[in-house]
Image: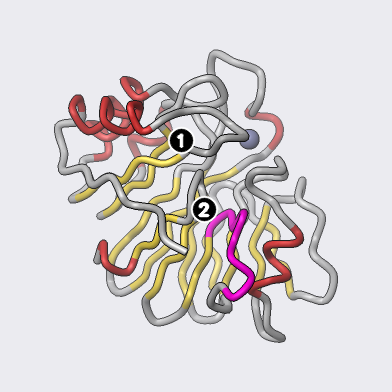
């Protein structure tokens, strides 16, 4: 399944299965593959990029985003709220909460989210910008995409703790190595060393 998961830098992913699903598309190449579904976790500039969504849009692309994200013009948009289960272009998407517990950037009241996407029979959890939160104990997933940089999200050590709770077959670190935000490959390596589940550090794709 990992061969169908493309890390595009920071929290940005292209997931390929029955359909092409992007999460938080950002800094994409101009010729990036078109999307059937675009999931946005929250409105911050490094997660919601109108210009990048425009690059991958086609007439039937569906955007899924919480209410804090302005709906991109001309595209069908579904509002995502934690606890919802949505179907977008045939893809099942469960919406889960994402928030900070010990910093101010992503308060629980803001309604930021993560997603569990069922693709190719696998449940892929994109945690969004979050700390370790009690709701993670209820998340069932085969693959977990977890932030590791600290500052705005959980640290690598905390991400390892999250992975140990989630017990995915595979965990993939994210939210590092973008020069405009925070985090380095060392954070991903620390996460890999501490997590008691298989971890793969992806090379950045186009
Ligand atoms: Zn954020």
- Going by the image, does 140 lie left or right of 69? left
User: Going 66% across and 67% down the picture, which residue do you hit?
Assistant: 63
Image quarter where ligand 1 lies? top right
Q: Nearer the viewer, residue 58 or 90?
A: 58
Tell me which numbered mark, 2 or 1, is placed earlier along the sequence: 2
User: Going 50% across and 69% down the picture, which residue do you hit?
Assistant: 21
> Where residue 156 sits in the image (x, y, percent)?
35, 25
Q: Nearer the viewer, residue 28 or 168?
A: 28
Q: Nearer the viewer, residue 85 or 29?
A: 29
Residue with the most extreme bottom position: 59
Image quadrant assignment for residue 1: bottom left
- Going by the image, does 203 lie left or right of 9? left
By secondary structure, the bulk of the magenta-drawn segment is best described as loop
- Going by the image, does 51 lie left or right of 144? right
Q: Which residues are magenta?
A: 23-31
Residue 113 lies, with reference to residue 53, above or below; the image says above
User: Going 47% across and 28% down the picture, which residue do you hit?
Assistant: 183
Residue 24 shows which numbered tag? Answer: none
**Residue at the disc numbered 2:** 12
User: For the residues marked 2 and 1, what is the alpha-carbon distance in whole angstroms?
Assistant: 11 Å
> Where residue 111 sits in the image (x, y, percent)?
67, 39
- Going by the image, does 99 lie left or right of 60? left
Asked if disc 2 is less than 8 Å from ligand 1, the answer is no
Which element carries disc 1, helix, strand or loop? Answer: loop
Is residue 25 in the magenta section?
Answer: yes
Is residue 198 in the magenta section?
Answer: no
Residue 176 shows which numbered tag? Answer: 1
């Amino acid at each position: 399944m990992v061969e169908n998961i493309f890390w595009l830098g920071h929290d940005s992913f292209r997931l390929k299965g029955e359909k092409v699903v992007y999460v938080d598309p950002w800094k994409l190449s101009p010729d990036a593959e078109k999307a059937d579904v675009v999931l946005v976790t929250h409105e911050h500039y490094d997660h919601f990029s109108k210009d990048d969504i425009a690059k991958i849009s086609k007439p039937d692309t569906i955007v899924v985003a919480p209410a804090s994200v302005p709906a991109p013009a001309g595209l069908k948009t579904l509002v995502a709220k934690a606890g919802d289960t949505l179907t977008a272009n045939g893809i099942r998407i469960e919406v889960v909460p994402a928030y900070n517990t010990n910093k101010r950037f992503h308060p629980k009241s803001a309604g930021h989210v993560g997603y569990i996407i069922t693709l190719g029979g696998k449940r892929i959890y994109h945690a969004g910008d979050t700390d370790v939160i009690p709701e993670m104990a209820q998340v069932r997933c085969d693959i977990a995409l977890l932030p590791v940089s600290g500052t705005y999200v959980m640290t690598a050590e905390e991400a390892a703790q999250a992975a140990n709770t989630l017990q995915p077959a595979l965990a993939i670190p994210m939210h590092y190595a973008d020069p405009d935000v925070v985090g380095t490959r060392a954070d991903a390596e620390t996460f890999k060393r501490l997590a008691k589940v298989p971890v793969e550090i992806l090379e950045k794709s186009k």
